[in-house]
Amino acid sequence: MKLTRHENNPIVVPGGAEWRRAAVFNPGVVEADGKYYMYERAAGSLRPFRTSIGLLESEDGVNFRPVADEPVFTADMLGFPGGSVEDARVVRIDGTYYMCYALQPYRFDCWPTGTGLPAYYPDNYPEWRENGVEPMITRSGIAASEDGIRFTPLCYTTPAEIDDRDNALFPEKIGGRFALLRRPMQYVGEKYGTNTPGIWISYSDDLFEWTEPELVAVAENPEWEGTKIGAAATPVKTDRGWLVLYHGVDAHSVYRVGALLLDLDDPSRVIARIRDPIMEPETYYERFGLVLPNVVFPTANVMVDGLLYIYYGCCDASIGLATVPLYELLDALTGGEDRA
Ligand code: BMA
């Protein structure tokens, strides 16, 4: 099983409008009425490092052009001027676009430290402490739109005091309820049945009230996913189960991509999982970025003529596309260890 990197990679790069001048990465993508809409996470500078969500469109899922002069979603719209909205994972359910986003409420600075790892530095921005927020804590929520262009904040999916990102809504209700993958960082220790942050699931009737998270999957292969794992993109419904790509982080902060299958009716149940990463940083744009090196971070996948198109952030700097025939990925999954 082999993913193919697109020859135009990276397919989307920073430039143009001031707010996307420094970096574009970790995009949501949906296909609607024959067009592909991409929701990029965009930064205008590293100091401060502040990201908003910009919109691009494409006829073929490869060549994207900006749609709007301004971002379509910002932290200002949530009442946090200067904060960041990040890592949009977008689905369309019954004609409405739902964007799961991560929110960091205030600005921070970001620079390379010379050791390969960046410093994320909030101390120049006293609002973090004045407002009693633990620096760098992330809250997640959902914004909604009827046309895919104008988004308005709908709800928070996670409590303010928990660091919880990598939220991904399933593209349809399951057993009559919305279902959401998430990654509560503090859910570790004996009480939670895991020593490292993992993938959890919650359900909701109305998107506003969510059930207590149930554990779905944790790191099993310490050499590449030992630090933490999190859902990558919107789960894909297949006849063998829900296909979920996820990212795994190793002890040196290298981000790789894993794959697992969840039961169609009970998506808290993992029925298959591939032991090795299906993708890891290899090319120059995946190994060298503005700050953190060695990151492939998928946040979207769509089906195009039997191929799974996987859109991913490259080192928090640009956007790549990799493809794989869906059946090849499913064969790799179900031919592996059976966890049913
Ligand atoms: C994660 C998130 C992502 C980011 C990745 C690599 O923790 O912040 O948004 O792409 O780190 O820096």
Image (cartoon, grey):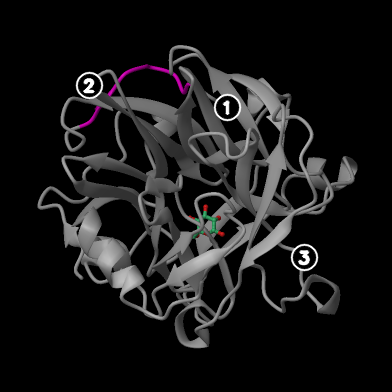
Mark closest to the chain's N terminus, 3 or 2: 2
* Residue identifier under label 1: 74
Residue at the bottom extreme of this rendering: 223
Asked if residue 54 lies in the magenta stretch, the reply is: no
> x and y percent of residue 152 in the render?
61, 17
Task: Give the vertical position of 36 relative to 12 (above or below).
Answer: above
Residue at the left extreme of this rendering: 7
Asked if residue 65 lies in the magenta stretch, the reply is: yes
Q: Residue at x 62, y 42 (%)?
A: 179
> x and y percent of residue 171 in the render?
48, 36
* Residue identifier under label 2: 34
Q: Amino acid at mark 1?
A: Thr
* Residue identifier under label 3: 187
Which is more foreground, mark 1 or mark 3?
3
Residue 116, located in which quarter of the rendered image? Answer: bottom left
Q: CA distance from mark 1 to mark 3?
A: 28 Å
* Count of numbered badges drawn on the protein: 3
Magenta span covers which residues?
64-72
Disc number placed over residue 230 in the picture, else none = none
SS assignment at label 1:
loop
Q: Are marks 3 and 2 in contact (CB under 8 Å)?
A: no
Residue in front for this viewpoint, 191 or 293: 191
Residue 210, located in which quarter of the rendered image? Answer: top right
